[in-house]
């Protein structure tokens, strides 16, 4: 009888050993038992550590992004889903990830490997130090646009009670940020997309920004466009309109052209300045004397946009480069 018990115990230990070896092999492949994030440490089953979660995410996106991009994305996703900052991840890399983060990491890896943008995967992005909700149907705010906002804030520092119009607001990043930077400003924002307006309003509520959002078509006739606005005059009009020629579609990365809304990105090659022409014409009728119009632009069309605004009747037309030394912004005065 004792002999049989010993045999049974030996068999049990053997099964556990085989199981642990199997788990280690699966862990190296980025998977684990039942899809859960479990690792084996000194013969014990443990929750995956922060550093292991980061490594698994980085491996999942390696075929889509460069090594450095994959590393940044892995840290961002792991920190967002597991609730730790970069400094916490560095200080305590072996801390176990929460059990509730397991499914989120697995799903995030699947989406990122398919090319879905990081910002859509986690549902938010940072702009000018603020967190903005984003989703399919709204353009992801870029760092270059922060520079446009900074230009506006610097130009109007110390002024209060300004009237501002953001044309093509998207996520509301420009309008909401200006509401924080300009004292007591009355800010209106328009977009043709109902989904964009919904997300923009959510972001305004998130940050307590008093922005009035209105559905409007920037390409409508000026009388029709102006008739849908809450105010008849503005001190500042700003727009980051679609400006990428359709011929550049094939050159764009998949995580941009296959996921972000094409109507917020691309214009016809036959008339790439169509939005600048329309918005410039609107602005000439809507701006107070001395009011200013600000645009984000395609790096190839800086001179053309400036010439168009001069022909429209604006003065003091100025271009400015972004931090990458590309022509990216235009400002003009009525």
Image (cartoon, rainbow, N blue to C red):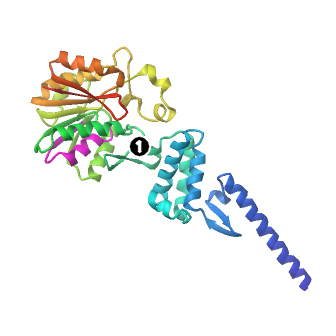
**Exactly how many numbered labels are in the figure?**
1
The quarter of the displayed image where residue 310 is located: top left
Q: Secondary structure at mark 1?
A: loop
* Coordinates of residue 184 in the picture (x, y in percent): 13, 48
* Residue range highlighted in magenta: 169-189
Q: Which residue is mark 1?
A: 135
Residue 90 versus residue 269 in the image, above or below: below
Query: Taking the image as drawn, is residue 223 in sight?
Result: no
Query: Taking the image as drawn, is residue 226 in sight?
Result: yes
Q: Residue furthest left?
A: 289
Taking the spot 45% from the left edge, 55% from the top edge, the residue there is: 80
Confirm whether the magenta stretch covers residue 50.
no
The quarter of the displayed image where residue 95 is located: bottom right
Quadrant, the C terminus: top left
* Coordinates of residue 91 in the picture (x, y in percent): 49, 63
* Coordinates of residue 130 in the picture (x, y in percent): 32, 50
Residue nearer the viewer, 318 or 226? 318
Taking the spot 16% from the left edge, 29% from the top edge, the residue there is: 226
Q: Is residue 258 left or right of residue 263?
A: right
Residue nearer the viewer, 326 or 37? 326
* Coordinates of residue 265 in the picture (x, y in percent): 38, 29
Taking the spot 13% from the left edge, 34% from the top edge, the residue there is: 234
Residue 18 versus residue 132 in the image, above or below: below
């Amino acid at each position: 009888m004792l002999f049989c018990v010993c045999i049974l115990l030996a068999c049990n230990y053997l099964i556990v050993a085989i199981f642990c070896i199997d788990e280690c092999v699966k862990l190296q492949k980025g998977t684990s038992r039942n899809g859960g994030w479990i690792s084996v440490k000194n013969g014990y089953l443990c929750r995956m550590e922060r550093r292991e979660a980061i490594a698994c995410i980085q491996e999942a996106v390696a075929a889509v992004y460069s090594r450095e991009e994959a590393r940044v994305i892995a840290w961002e996703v792991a920190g967002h889903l597991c609730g730790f900052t970069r400094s916490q991840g560095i200080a305590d890399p072996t801390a176990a990830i929460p059990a509730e983060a397991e499914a989120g990491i697995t799903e995030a890896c699947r989406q990122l490997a398919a090319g879905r943008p990081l910002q859509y995967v986690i549902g938010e992005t940072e702009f000018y130090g603020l967190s903005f909700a984003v989703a399919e149907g709204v353009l992801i705010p870029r760092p270059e646009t922060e520079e446009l906002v900074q230009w506006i804030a610097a130009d109007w520092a110390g002024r209060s009670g300004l009237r501002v119009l953001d044309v093509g607001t998207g996520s509301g990043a420009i309008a909401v940020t200006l509401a924080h930077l300009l004292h007591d400003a009355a800010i209106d924002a328009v977009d043709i997309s109902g989904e964009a307006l919904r997300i923009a309003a959510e972001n305004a509520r998130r940050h307590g920004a008093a922005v009035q959002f209105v559905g409007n078509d920037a390409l409508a006739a000026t009388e029709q466009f102006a008739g849908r606005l809450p105010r008849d005059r503005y001190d500042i009009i700003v727009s980051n309109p679609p400006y990428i020629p359709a011929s550049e579609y094939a050159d764009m990365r998949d995580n941009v052209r296959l996921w972000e809304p094409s109507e917020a990105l691309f214009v016809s090659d036959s008339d790439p300045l169509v939005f600048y022409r329309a918005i410039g014409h609107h602005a000439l009728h809507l701006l107070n004397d001395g009011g200013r119009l600000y645009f984000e632009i395609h790096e190839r069309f800086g001179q053309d946009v400036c010439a168009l605004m001069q022909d429209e009747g604006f003065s003091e037309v100025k271009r400015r480069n972004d931090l990458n030394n590309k022509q990216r912004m235009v400002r003009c005065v009525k």
